[in-house]
Amino acid sequence: MPGRAEPQSFLVSILPFMVMCVGMFIALLDIQIVASSLQDIGGGLSAAQDQIGWVQTSYLVAEIIVIPLSGWLTRVFSTRWLFTISAAGFTLASMLCGFAWSIESMIVFRALQGLLGASMIPTVFTSSFHYFQGPRRVYAAAVVGSIASIAPTLGPVIGGWITDTLSWHWLFYVNVIPGTIITILVAALVKIDKADPSLLKGADYIGMVLMAVSLGTAEYVLEEGTRWNWFDDATIRNGAIVASVTMVLFVIRSLTYSQPVVDFRAFGNRNFAIGCFLSFVTGIGIFATIYLTPLFLGYVRGYDAFQTGMAVFSTGVASMVGVPVYIFLAKRFDTRWLMMFGLASFGASMWSFSAITSQWGAAELLIPQLFRGFPQVFAVAPSVNLGLGSLPPERLKYASGLFNTMRNLGGAVGIAICGAILNDRTNFHFLTIASHLTPQNEAAMRLVDNVALRYGQLPGAVADGHTASLKQLWSLAYREASTMAYADAFLVIMAAFVVATALVPFLRNVTPKPLPPGAH
């Protein structure tokens, strides 16, 4: 009966998918929710400055190790129980993070949080192809793509607000209630496949170890490289060697073993290979811009966590506005051209960011951020359908983990490159500016004399006034040099999106097959 078919469809497909999407949103949100509150967490736990970053790094390292394994884990435990275990473990780890009594315990609990919660992300990507067939995949791809782009963007906003309103502990306690509800509902509603524990016998455990060492070490090198001046540091240098060697061994092992945990043969599918590269580039764009903008507002403009969050909030709003527009257009146009629009527009927004000055605040950033946020779903959602939708069902679970790993790896690489650019180009621009601050530069000398005169009128020697004026001149030069380095970083991101846009025409269009008669 038609009247009963619709509620049944809601309970069987839409509601379970919605619940899983909320879990994915929370897992992605937690990647960046601490980004604007690291100083508060460090202060609360009496952490040294070089320890604070590990609150973020430990989560990312653990997550990037588990995501590629999600396809194999899904077959072993089933989608239902893997997601249930992942949601329950993530919730428990979140509570432990809130209870953390030292920076060491926080790092361990954050790693546990990333380790247990990571499987929720690729599992949702795979499940969208099960729950939605035919033309309805457009809606699923739009929802999954928008979550993948919006959640990390909103992380610093929500994190800053929670820290300022309550305390940093609530960055983690806020996950407990929704996490518990998701755990219960997924266990009750999700019925996609069955567990196959027999896969535990004969699994490629050596490959798992090689992959964990390679990806974990690579993530560490990318996260910590800038701080330790890259290959000048022995630990970073050795880490890069270990990551490279173990990755080569892992690829060889996966291509020759009968039951690999990661199916690299999926890269033989042109759409999947290009889709993974585009996922990598969108990871650079989403995560690197989330890294750069709050950093600029905090260090150059002196914004606190809440002010920074409110300043970047417009990006999330624009992204949400873009979702229904994308759904409307995706039913009428070839998604490849929509993707070209998304990638090209994102690249153009990076060009608009390159005009940044040290006076830019929330008002000046508004238009560039709207310009960046709106096309995000156009860049991400089509890659889900075009990249994963072209694969046969038996390869989809394994490929989804690879696809999501590429996005996270892109984010790590993007942040590392931008960190290196900020470091190197700030020095370059500072030396360039300083070379013009000579006695022959009348404007600079007038500034020094005026500041020295004002300080000289205060108690103290005139020499102190000259010293203060030179310090102020140095500060101004460094501020401008730093701002110019941010502009350089945005231009590099733009270049990556130009390359990505040029690759879209090489994708084959994936037309969703019509629903079979009587399908819901």
Image: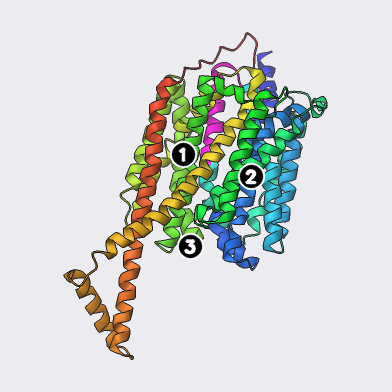
Closest to the camera, between mark 1 and mark 2, is: 2
147 left or right of 45 in image = left
The kind of secondary structure element at disc 1 is helix
Res. 14 in view: no
Q: Looking at the image, is 269 positioned above or below residue 464?
A: above
Q: Are marks 1 and 2 in contact (CB under 8 Å)?
A: no
Q: Looking at the image, is 46 positioned above or below residue 366?
A: below
Badge number at residue 447: none
Provide residue 294's location: percent of width, then percent of height: 46, 54
Label 1: how many Cα within 10 Å (few below 14, some 14–19, many 20+)? many
The kind of secondary structure element at disc 3 is loop
Residue 140, magenta (yes or no)? yes
Badge number at residue 319: 1
Label 2: how many Cα within 10 Å (few below 14, some 14–19, many 20+)? many
> Residue at left 68%, top 42%?
117
Closest to the camera, between mark 2 and mark 3, is: 2
Q: Which residues are magenta?
A: 132-150
Res. 449 in view: yes
Badge number at residue 304: 3
Name, please, the residue furthest toward the top: 517
Q: Could you tell me how far apart the alpha carbons at marks 2 and 3 are, in whole angstroms?
A: 32 Å
Q: Quadrant of the N terminus?
A: top right
> Residue at left 67%, top 49%?
175
* Residue type beneath disc 2: Gly
Provide residue 200's location: percent of width, then percent of height: 80, 29
Determine the main secondary structure of the stretch shown in magenta: helix
Badge number at residue 216: 2
Provide residue 163's location: percent of width, then percent of height: 58, 60
Q: Could you tell me how far apart the alpha carbons at marks 3 and 1 are, in whole angstroms?
A: 24 Å
Q: Quadrant of the C terminus?
A: top right
Point out the tag, 2 or 3, that comes first from the N-terminus. Answer: 2
